């Protein structure tokens, strides 16, 4: 009796060890940096719950399908990221062209202070000088050019740099949906008679080949995922057919067992 109990416990321990090894084998996600392992495990768990695997072959299919579905989602995400990046690059270029110089005063001051003589200017004087340069006042322009004389730069270079940095800052604020930035960008787009969609369409040809490649890769991953799902369905169908063929034999055996009298009893 004790030997049987130990045997059962040993068998159960081996089964648990095998199950643990199986989950370790098939639960390992193939993720890129920044992808969420917890989300992948949730996807895998939901697929496993839907399929209800009966053996290791089912677990292999489930692991493959989870990986392929994750790949499909990844390609879709990368496509959206590429389109978003194109749109933001187009927006930044638009802002550089449309921003008035007076909106770039702070960046003008910060650039001017990178030069020795600019560092010595009091803050209020630097602000005034920047605003006057934005209005293209000759005296202010001459003063800034004197500050820049030891270099190969002039006031236009500083204004261009200030506009570029301001456009970048405004674009980032727009992405964060800061109210003031959203209002200003929407006003500039309306004044120009354009929109984010129109900016993206104009920029799209630069990356159209890459986008088409991503779509082909997405379609390929979808086909392989669908093939895996089909194989599960086909396997379940074959299993069902095998069970239907086996059940009459099993039922016949049970009928024989029920008809066999127990020892010391007479058959009815």
Image (cartoon, grey):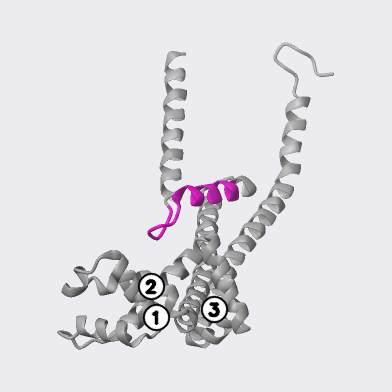
Are the residues at dot 1 and dot 3 in contact (C-beta closer than 8 Å)? no
| Above-or-below relation of 17 to 237 | above
Give the position of the C terminus as an image quadrant: top right
At numbered mark 1, what does the secondary structure look like: helix, strand or loop? Answer: helix
Magenta part mainly helix, strand or loop? helix
Rounded to the nearest angstrom, the CA distance separating label 3 from label 2 is 47 Å
At numbered mark 3, what does the secondary structure look like: helix, strand or loop? Answer: helix
Residue sitting farthest toward the right: 268
What percent of the width, then of the height, locates residue 206?
48, 86
Magenta highlight range = 29-48
Rounded to the nearest angstrom, the CA distance separating label 2 from label 1 is 8 Å
Numbered circle sitting on residue 93: none
What percent of the width, then of the height, locates residue 211?
52, 80
Nearer the viewer's eye, disc 3 or disc 2? 2
Residue that label 1 marks: 134
Residue shown at the point (56%, 66%) measured from the top left: 182
Q: Name the foreground residue: 1 vs 33.
A: 33
> Is there any visible trace of residue 36 in the rendered image?
yes
Mark sitting earlier along the chain (1/3):
1
Residue that label 3 marks: 216
Q: Name the foreground residue: 43 vs 248.
A: 43
What percent of the width, then of the height, locates residue 50?
64, 48
Mark sitting earlier along the chain (3/2):
2
Residue that label 2 marks: 105
Q: Does the magenta stretch include residue 240?
A: no
Mark sitting earlier along the chain (2/1):
2
Circle 1 Cα neighbour tier, 10 Å, few/some/many (<14 / 14–19 / ≥20): many
Are the residues at dot 2 and dot 1 in contact (C-beta closer than 8 Å)? yes
Residue shown at the point (33%, 88%) measured from the top left: 138
């Amino acid at each position: 009796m004790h030997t049987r109990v130990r045997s059962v416990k040993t068998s159960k321990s081996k089964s648990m060890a095998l199950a643990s090894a199986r989950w370790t084998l098939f639960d390992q996600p193939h993720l890129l940096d920044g992808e969420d392992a917890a989300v992948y495990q949730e996807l895998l768990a939901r697929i496993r719950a839907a399929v209800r695997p009966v053996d290791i072959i089912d677990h292999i299919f489930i692991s493959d399908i989870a990986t392929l579905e994750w790949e499909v989602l990844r390609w879709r995400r990368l496509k959206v990221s590429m389109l978003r990046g194109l749109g933001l690059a187009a927006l930044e270029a638009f802002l550089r062209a449309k921003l008035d110089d007076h909106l770039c005063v702070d960046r003008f001051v910060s650039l001017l202070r990178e030069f020795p003589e600019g560092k010595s200017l009091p803050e209020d004087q630097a602000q005034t000088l920047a605003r006057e340069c934005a209005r293209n006042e000759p005296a202010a322009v001459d003063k800034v050019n004197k500050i820049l004389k030891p270099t190969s730069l002039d006031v236009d270079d500083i204004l261009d740099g200030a506009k570029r940095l301001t456009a970048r800052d405004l674009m980032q604020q727009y992405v964060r949906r800061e109210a003031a930035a959203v209002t200003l960008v929407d006003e500039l787009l309306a004044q120009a008679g354009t929109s984010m969609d129109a900016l993206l369409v104009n920029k799209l040809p630069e990356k159209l080949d890459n986008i088409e490649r991503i779509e082909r890769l997405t379609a390929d991953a979808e086909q392989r995922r669908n093939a895996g799902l089909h194989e599960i369905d086909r396997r379940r169908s074959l299993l069902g057919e095998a069970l239907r063929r086996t059940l009459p034999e099993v039922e016949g055996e049970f009928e024989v067992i029920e008809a066999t009298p127990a020892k010391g009893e007479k058959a009815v």
